[in-house]
């Protein structure tokens, strides 16, 4: 049996998010928002008919295209199909069957049909209801989508999801990593739940389920060299969230080929766009072994909302000739102004001298 993995605070938050988004309760919350939308649309369609709005919307050029009758005949079925699909998926959870929501098909369907038959206030209310459904469906789909080669979740969008959802977690559930339940990428697990990569602490956690190849562990998403540099430079507190520092990072790294290859590189010299630029270019896929992260029922722990990236390595001293275990800035007392950046896996150099091997120390000012 392998030595158990100790989850970092950030990994515990990821596990809490994924269990939350994959839960039956969360799917039912989306269903409630969807049912409320169905009731709302029924009401305004009836009101449109009672007020005979369509008589003012029929035209020689467009015919009935702008009318509530057209919407009821063509867009309404997409809404009802979405409602029925969601009800079926809730029933299927009893046999541990998971799937993405019907949001994508629904959205593509209704986008083809005009709502000009509704008042501006009704259209605005409808848009807000759709946004609420989309918020739930996005998190569910990111967690359960197994139709691509790698996980939809990665450090950037998980950070944003935590910011949007953390108010629901007064405390974190307690977890333990089961080293006796291990599965490779592209394999179906024997237990349904969250999994952590055994050999890369920066790889985002995944949710997978048993009984179907559709529930398999995908390739993970982890930092590439640019991403490792970003977290070493900014730390967990500012990474993705401090737009000014993200822009400063991009400006310092403007010659990095990973950034320059992005199609929107030239347009990204603003705080928000700089963050998105790094998010598009700072990750790579990872084939790994994954271990089951078990949630301990009824047990919780407090968490710190602000944290630095934590990696279980010795940051105090590393001898020359050894491999760097965490990307970041180091210095050696053996040479003035020696502070420099080392990538993970880079061999630490010996700068010479009469005092034996060079000792490189982690610089706390990252």
Image (spheres, helix red, strand yellow):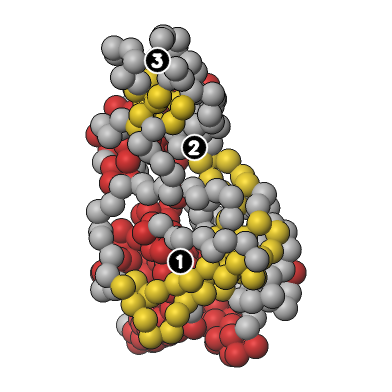
Q: Residue furthest front?
A: 355
Work out whether residue 89 or residue 77 is closer to the camera in this orientation and state it.
Answer: 89
Q: Are marks 3 and 1 in contact (CB under 8 Å)?
A: no
* 3 or 1: mark nearer the eye: 3
Which mark identifies residue 325?
2
> Is the C terminus in the top left, top right, bottom left or bottom right quadrant?
top left
Which mark identifies residue 219?
none
Residue 70 shows up from this direction: no
Residue at mark 1: 15
Check disc 1 and report its element: helix, strand or loop.
Answer: helix
Residue at mark 3: 355
Work out whether residue 56 or residue 259 is closer to the camera in this orientation and state it.
Answer: 259
Q: Residue at x 52, y 68 (%)?
A: 177
Check disc 2 and report its element: helix, strand or loop.
Answer: loop
Work out whether residue 278 or residue 219 is closer to the camera in this orientation and state it.
Answer: 219
- Mark 2 or mark 1, earlier in chain: 1
Check disc 3 and report its element: helix, strand or loop.
Answer: loop
Q: Are marks 3 and 2 in contact (CB under 8 Å)?
A: no
Q: CA distance from mark 3 to mark 2?
A: 24 Å
2 relative position to 227: left or right: right
């Amino acid at each position: 049996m392998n030595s158990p993995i100790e989850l970092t605070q950030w990994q515990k938050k990821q596990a809490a998010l994924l269990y939350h988004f994959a839960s039956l309760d969360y799917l039912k919350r989306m269903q409630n928002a969807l049912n409320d939308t169905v009731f709302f649309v029924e009401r305004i369609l009836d009101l449109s008919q009672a007020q005979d709005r369509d008589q003012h919307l029929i035209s020689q050029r467009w015919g009935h295209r702008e009318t509530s009758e057209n919407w009821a005949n063509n867009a309404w079925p997409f809404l009802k199909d979405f409602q029925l699909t969601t009800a079926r998926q809730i029933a299927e959870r009893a046999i541990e069957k998971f799937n993405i929501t019907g949001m994508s098909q629904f959205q593509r369907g209704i986008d083809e049909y005009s709502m000009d038959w509704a008042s501006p206030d009704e259209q605005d209310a409808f848009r807000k209801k759709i946004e609420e459904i989309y918020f739930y469906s996005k998190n569910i789909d990111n967690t359960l989508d197994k139709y691509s080669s790698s996980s939809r979740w990665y450090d950037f969008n998980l950070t944003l999801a935590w910011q949007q959802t953390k108010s629901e977690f007064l405390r974190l559930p307690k977890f333990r990593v089961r080293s006796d339940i291990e599965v490779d990428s592209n394999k179906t697990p024997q237990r349904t739940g969250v999994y952590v990569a055994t050999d890369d602490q920066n790889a985002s956690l995944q949710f997978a389920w048993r009984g179907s190849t559709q529930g398999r562990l995908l390739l993970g998403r982890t930092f590439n060299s640019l991403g490792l540099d970003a977290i070493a430079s900014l730390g967990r507190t500012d990474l993705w969230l401090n737009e000014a520092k993200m822009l400063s990072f991009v400006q310092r790294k403007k010659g990095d080929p990973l950034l320059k290859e992005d199609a929107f590189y030239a347009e990204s010299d603003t705080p928000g766009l700089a963050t998105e630029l790094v998010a598009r270019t700072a990750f790579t896929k990872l084939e790994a072994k994954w271990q089951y992260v078990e949630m301990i029922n009824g047990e919780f722990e407090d968490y710190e909302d602000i944290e630095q990236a934590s990696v279980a390595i010795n940051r105090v001293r590393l001898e020359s000739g050894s491999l760097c275990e965490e990307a970041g800035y180091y210095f050696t007392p053996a040479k003035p102004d020696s502070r420099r950046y080392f990538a993970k896996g880079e061999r630490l150099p010996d700068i010479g001298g009469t005092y034996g091997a060079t000792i490189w120390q982690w610089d706390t000012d990252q």
